Image (cartoon, grey):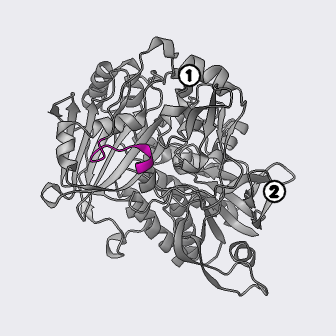
Amino acid sequence: MSYDVVIVGAGPAGLAAAIRLKQLCRAADTDLSVCVLEKGAEVGAPLRTQNPVLAAALYTCDGIDDTLVIWAFVFYCSAGAHVLSGNVFEPRALDELIPKWRQEDAPIRVPVSSDKFWMLTKNKAWTLPSPFDNKGNYVISLSQLVRWMSVKAEELGVEVYPGFAASEILYDENQIVAGVATNDVGIAKDGSKRETFQPGVELRGRITLLAEGCRGSLSENIITNHKLRESGQGQHQTYALGIKEVWEIEEGKHKPGSVVHTVGWPLDMKTYGGSFLYHLDDRQLAIGLVVALNYRNPFLSPYDEFQKFKQHPAIRTLLEGGTVLQYGARTLNEGGFQSIPNPVFPGGAIIGCSAGFLNVPKIKGSHTAMKSGMLAAEATFKALVEGSSMDLYWENLKKSWIWDELYRARNYRPAFEYGFIPGMALSAVERYIFKGKSPFTLKHGKPDHEATEMANLHLPISYPKPDGQVSFDVPSSLYRSNTNHEHDQPPHLRLRDPAVPESVNLPQYAGPESRYCPARVYEYVSDENGDPKLHINAQNCLHCKACDIKDPKQNIEWTVPEGGGGPGYTVM
């Protein structure tokens, strides 16, 4: 199947690009065919397609032709199933993309009403001056917003196909990217074809835009193979892991639009991170903990730190009497300005969090992701209609408010390489004295996987047992994530060297994969001889990508499973 533009990922960047392309087509009275692929899926919604090949892949029947419209209950079928974010939303980019969104029933209804910043000790919450400026921003569910954007894209003529995992980059005879291929479905663990087998589909595009989100597998391959990091800002990317729950809390405790950020406890003084509490509507509260993945202690468990955090007196009282609605986790880019790659490659471009436009001190990236998608769409339109170069995207990106915003924010994250107190002090100087215009640019420390220290340099951390009221065990949380994978399929989590876990990770680092994963995908069990052996529970995977980032020897390769597998977020 051929399109003018193939977009991989139906998040804010991918959908913003698709919408902007179609807007430009209408303004110029021309048309470009635009397809958006999304690996996430939900169960039970109807999927309609007029594409005969995709129809055949979705539903087996005779007589498929070019005009067939199939309505079938299948795995799908809306964008947003894999989208997770805080989220205090800055509408700047959306104002540019859809100026009348307020009149079009967008799921953006709760303006920020208060903005607090706490420093936590074990039993106290100390109020500090808030460094955030959230006036005019909204507390939202990003997964709900991208569903709305998906509808808007389809209304403009974009073809959106959730439940299809792009697993391979296609090249033409000149080694220019020419689209993507989805993986085969219905392959058993042993490599044989099950009764449900359907071959993957090639989707060829004149331009391919990669909008896979943080640590996208295709994007990372392109960045490495084309040396885009080196031709960009030059520094490696650094990451954090965000763990989140959405609660329904008691009416008397609910304050729509209230925003609280914290630093300090329960994290140690050498680990960067913090928490958030955002009051949405309908008595819902988004609560989460973000832990930088350059932490040193291999015994640290981000999941257990989050459960511990909820036991703080200022937090527990808010949650008591409430109910957890959903759980999830996702990594996020924290490299900022220093880590931006050149986003253009022959035949396409990388947009959104796949490139890494998160503003760390703001803790926001949706607005920059959307704007990058819009800029890429404008360059794509000119390339296809006017014959210009996709390099226009890179040039316009450096002239945009994204570049200015990330430049001003560039020194906050690396300041914490020196520890919590020096980091807070340097951040205050950067904000209140230099105002983002300091005459120097700090560098990041070691890559996250190299930052992990040997186990013999640290003491094991003893975490409290979950109480089942405010803190929970992993199986209970996984149930709330709606995570599902076809059990009988080849593993999508692959070890480059199967011997490394037992020969290196366990003896030297005390098996950190059993702790950095927020879904307990990795566990050491005894084999028939009583020796510890790494067991991978791939069906638990939340697609957070922490293992692909934090494994000390970079031995774990995250690849896409069958389309439709993974978490099923609805309010995240």
| Residue 26 x/y as whole percent | 56, 76
Q: Give, as a single range, the part of the protein colored magenta.
A: 467-477
Q: What residue did someone put label 1 on?
A: 450
Q: Quadrant of the C terminus?
A: bottom left
Q: Which mark is residue 107?
A: none
Q: Which mark is residue 192?
A: 2
**Which mark lies nearer to you, 1 or 2?**
2
For mark 1, give the secondary structure.
helix
Location of residue 410 by image quarter: top left
Q: Quadrant of the N terminus?
A: bottom right
* Residue visible at 47% across and 45% down in the picture: 330
Q: What amino acid type is highlighted by mark number 1?
A: Glu
In this rendering, position of residue 86 left or right of residue 354: left
| Residue 547 x/y as whole percent | 56, 36
- Residue 474 covered by magenta stretch: yes
Q: Calculate the distance from the C-alpha at mark 1 to the C-alpha at mark 2.
A: 38 Å
